[in-house]
Image: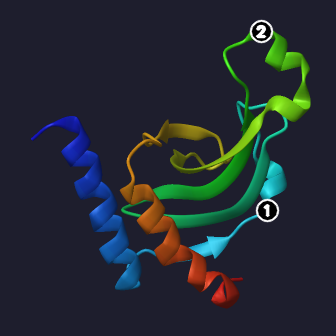
């Protein structure tokens, strides 16, 4: 089994565990996050726990600039993009591990957790 398929299997498992309420998510304060993109806009943050591991799932927006150096100095040239990130975090909310963000199924996990937002504390 290749690495990409293992991540897909991991996300499928998290999706099923969330649907079965074996992974319970809660809303979290987005101000605790510091991203590696300047001017990133963190939109929603959820914390979960599974198998004695703390999980953080969040969506953020960032501005992507072209490869032309001049574009970096023209803010209007950037294009807003959105990504979803899943992390395993320690007890101080520091990331220990980050899932690859280029696997499409991470969006499905987020879509399963997002409707729960109104029921979360």
Does 116 sit above or below residue 38?
A: below
In which quadrant of the rendered image does the C terminus lie?
bottom right
User: Which is in the foreground here, disc 1 or disc 2?
Assistant: 2
The answer to which of 2 and 22 lies nearer the viewer is: 2
Q: Residue at x 62, y 50 (%)?
A: 91
Quick one: label 1 or label 2, which is nearer the N terminus? Answer: 1
Q: Is residue 42 left or right of residue 56?
A: right
Where's residue 83, x and y in %? 59, 49
Label 2 SS: helix
What residue is shown at x 89% (from left), y 34% (from top)?
A: 76
Give me the residue at 89% from left, 30% from top. Answer: 75
Residue neighbourhood size for the residue with mark 2, other residues' Cα within 10 Å, grouped as few (<14), some (14–19), many (≥20): few
Q: Position of residue 17 (x, y in %)?
A: 34, 75
| Residue 10 located left or right of residue 26 | left
Q: Which of 75/5 is in front? A: 75
- Answer above or below: position of 59 versus 26: above
**Helix, strand, or loop for circle 1?**
loop
Left or right position of 33 against 23 = right
| Residue bearing mark 1 | 29
Q: Are marks 1 and 2 in contact (CB under 8 Å)?
A: no
Position of the N terminus, as image quadrant, is: top left
Name the side, left or right, on which 108 lies relative to 48.
left
Residue at image mark 2:
69
Residue lying farthest top?
A: 69
Among the 4 quarters of the image, the one containing residue 2: top left
User: Foreground residue, 116 or 50?
Assistant: 116
In the image, 15 versus 80, the foreground residue is 80
Identify the residue at the far left of this view: 1
């Amino acid at each position: 089994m290749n690495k990409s398929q293992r991540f897909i299997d991991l996300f499928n498992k998290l999706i099923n565990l969330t649907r079965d309420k074996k992974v319970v998510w809660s809303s979290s304060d987005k101000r605790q996050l510091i991203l590696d993109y300047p001017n990133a806009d963190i939109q929603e943050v959820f914390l979960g726990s599974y198998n004695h591991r703390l999980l953080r799932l969040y969506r953020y927006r960032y501005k992507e600039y072209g490869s032309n150096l001049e574009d970096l100095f023209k803010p209007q040239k950037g294009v807003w993009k959105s990504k979803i990130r899943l992390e395993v975090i320690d007890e101080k909310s520091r990331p220990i591990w980050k899932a690859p963000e280029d696997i499409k199924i991470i969006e499905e996990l987020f879509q399963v957790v997002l409707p729960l937002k109104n029921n979360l504390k």
